Image (cartoon, rainbow, N blue to C red):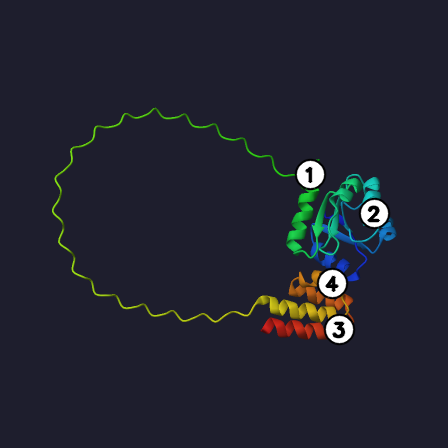
Amino acid sequence: MPKTLLAVDDSVTMRKVLEIAFSGEEFNVITAEGRDDALGKMSEKPSVVLIDGGEDWGYALAKDVRAQAPGATILMMSSRFSPYDAAKAKESGADDNLEKPFESNAAVDKVKKAMAAHEGGGDVAAAAAPAPAAAPAPKAAPVAAAAPAPKAAAAAPAPAKAAEAPKPAAAAAPAKAAAAPAATNGKAMAGKLADLGLTPQQVEAVMALSRQAVEEVIWEVVPVLAATMIREEITRLTKE
């Protein structure tokens, strides 16, 4: 039976990204755009709650969720623009952090590990205990030095080898054509998305998705004209 996952983010694009990333046989995804909306959906008894830590109410909401659902696994979502605050997370009862942008498979794995750690009463961020050091091997008994062997008569010097003819120089390997840096296409796509009015956080989230997921987001949340422009850009970039 799939577990209910509540994703809380004020960005409609990010909520759609999370819905696409986690929808499947393992999770039933519900979303909320703010603190009040999220608290209203706690009646659906989510097993996992993902909260945007960049919002002013993010860690306060985590504390509210922990009070209402002690058994829920809570992950704060951070980014380079809104770094994870470990102290606030611990105080609010959050279990771990999910950094944006993320790969879908990696995000699902991170959530599963956090759930396992929470259910087992462990700390997902704690390092594994080091293995005990192996006992040192006993020292070998010293070996008596052998008597020196008598020196053999000096052997006659071997005749000098005939000078070998110099080997022909190896043909120089053809220089490989330099591959165009993949970052060029990525920057071009990011620039297009930014021109359409997406925030840096939204651009990062969209760039982390697969082509199929990008198209799903486009059809759901971007106006028709913008969708056409992005689809044309994706087609051009994927053909290069």
Upstream in the sequence, badge 3 or badge 4? Answer: 4
* The disc label shown at residue 123, or none: 1
Q: Identify the residue at horizontal 61%, vertical 69% (top origin).
A: 184
Upstream in the sequence, badge 1 or badge 3? Answer: 1
In the picture, measured across the screen, residue 9 lies left or right of residue 234, that is: right
State the CA–CA distance, disc 1 to disc 3. Answer: 44 Å
**Residue under numbered circle 4:** 200
Under mark 2, the amino acid is: Leu
Under mark 1, the amino acid is: Asp
Rendered location of residue 63, percent (x, y): 82, 43
Rendered location of residue 180, percent (x, y): 55, 70
Rendered location of residue 10, percent (x, y): 81, 57
State the CA–CA distance, disc 1 to disc 2. Answer: 21 Å
Q: Identify the residue at horizontal 75%, vertical 73% (top origin).
A: 226
Upstream in the sequence, badge 2 or badge 3? Answer: 2
Upstream in the sequence, badge 4 or badge 1? Answer: 1
Rendered location of residue 149, percent (x, y): 18, 32
Return the residue nearer the eye: 101 or 149. Answer: 149
State the CA–CA distance, disc 2 to disc 3. Answer: 34 Å
Under mark 4, the amino acid is: Pro
Judged from the image, the secondary structure of the residue bearing numbered disc 1 is: loop
* The disc label shown at residue 226, or none: 3
Q: Looking at the picture, does residue 42 appear above or below residue 150?
A: below
State the CA–CA distance, disc 3 to disc 4. Answer: 17 Å
Callout in the foreground (2, 4): 4
**Residue under numbered circle 2:** 61
Upstream in the sequence, badge 2 or badge 4? Answer: 2
Judged from the image, the secondary structure of the residue bearing numbered disc 3 is: helix
Q: Identify the residue at horizontal 72%, vertical 50% (top origin).
A: 27
Callout in the foreground (4, 1): 4
Dot 1, crowdedness within 10 Å: few (<14), some or many (≥20)? few
